Amino acid sequence: MAGHNKWSQIKRKKAANDNQRGKIISKHIRAIQSAVREGGGGDPSSNLALKNALGAAKADDVPSDNVDRAIERALGGAEGGSFEAVAYEGYGPAGVAFLVEALTDNRNRTVAEVRHVFSKHGGNMSGSTAWQFDAVGMIVVPDASEATQEAAIDLGALDIEAEEEMLTITTPPTDLYRIAEALSERGVTPEVTQLTKVPQTRASVERGDAAKIARMVDALEDLDDVQNVYTTADVDVADVMAGGLS
């Protein structure tokens, strides 16, 4: 996922067509099952990986029935093999850095698919890029009032960004759930609580390159094994895909 404001990306996923929604839900189910099997059980209070996977699924409106069935199947050892977390690094159009995270049961297949997208869209999988991104917590609340912004800062937020009536709060990874729970206690219930990555420095790009980068992000996200796509481009992918740039 990439772009100026993570809430824009989430809105784009929620507005996806039925086929795209099916793929998004399948990716979350895979992440949940992997977290249960690898993280030590189906209780999110003692399985941080599962807690993070559930937070991401909730942000994309994955139905609770799907989530419950995924946990039950993973606990019972049914359906699907063992998935391995892998990351791919490289550069895309205009030389912007890409970091691609995937869950796969076949490394050879996944790397071939990812490499094909890089090549097709003018990128290359060479060089190290992971160091250019920092892990952070992200909270989105439906309240961008001054009082909520001040509360987020007082609680230890690294950054805040208001868009319409939504407030996106960036936190240190270790403080994500503490801050989310504190906001809930103040009557501000988060719609999104999840871990993500943000670039240390964003790269400005020309309009033509922005469209190329957005198409490359979209193609990578369309791969079944890919879970997350991060880029240093100063581009709002949701806006570009909606026709805001050309």
Image (cartoon, helix red, strand yellow):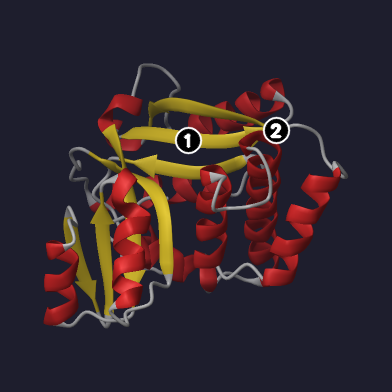
| In-front residue for pair 219/50 | 50
In x, y percent, where is residue 68?
Answer: 73, 63
Q: Is residue 154 left or right of residue 5?
A: left
Task: State whether residue 238 is above or below residue 228.
Answer: below
Q: CA distance from mark 1 to mark 2?
A: 16 Å
Q: Which mark is residue 100?
A: 1
Q: How many labels, in total?
A: 2
Image-based side of 10 in relation to 187, left or right: right
Q: Which residue corresponds to the image point at 69% horizontal and 62% vertical from the top-left? A: 67
Classed neighbour count for the residue bearing mark 1: other residues with Cα under 10 Å, few (<14), some (14–19), many (≥20): many
Return the disc, 1 or 2, that comes first in the chain's sequence. Answer: 2
Residue displayed at 30% across by 68% down: 182
Q: Quadrant of residue 91?
A: top left
- Name the quadrant containing residue 110: top right
Q: Residue at x 45, y 43 (%)?
A: 229
On the picture, is 93 further left or further right than 38?
Answer: left
Check disc 1 and give the amino acid type. Answer: Val
Q: Which residue is mark 2?
A: 83
Of marks 1 and 2, the one in the foreground: 2
The structure residue drawn at horizontal position 79% and vertical position 46%, both measured from the top left corner, is 75
Kindly tell me whether residue 220 is visible in this rendering: no
Pointers 1 and 2 in contact (CB under 8 A)?
A: no
In what element is the residue under mark 2?
loop
- Within 10 Å of disc 2 (Cα), the crowding (few <14, some 14-19, many 20+) is many
Tell me if I can see residue 215 in this picture.
yes
| Looking at the image, residue 240 lies above or below residue 175 | below
What secondary structure is found at the residue carrying circle 1? strand
Q: Which mark is residue 122?
A: none
Q: Nearer the viewer, residue 240 or 28?
A: 28
The amino acid type, in three-letter code, at marker 2 is: Phe
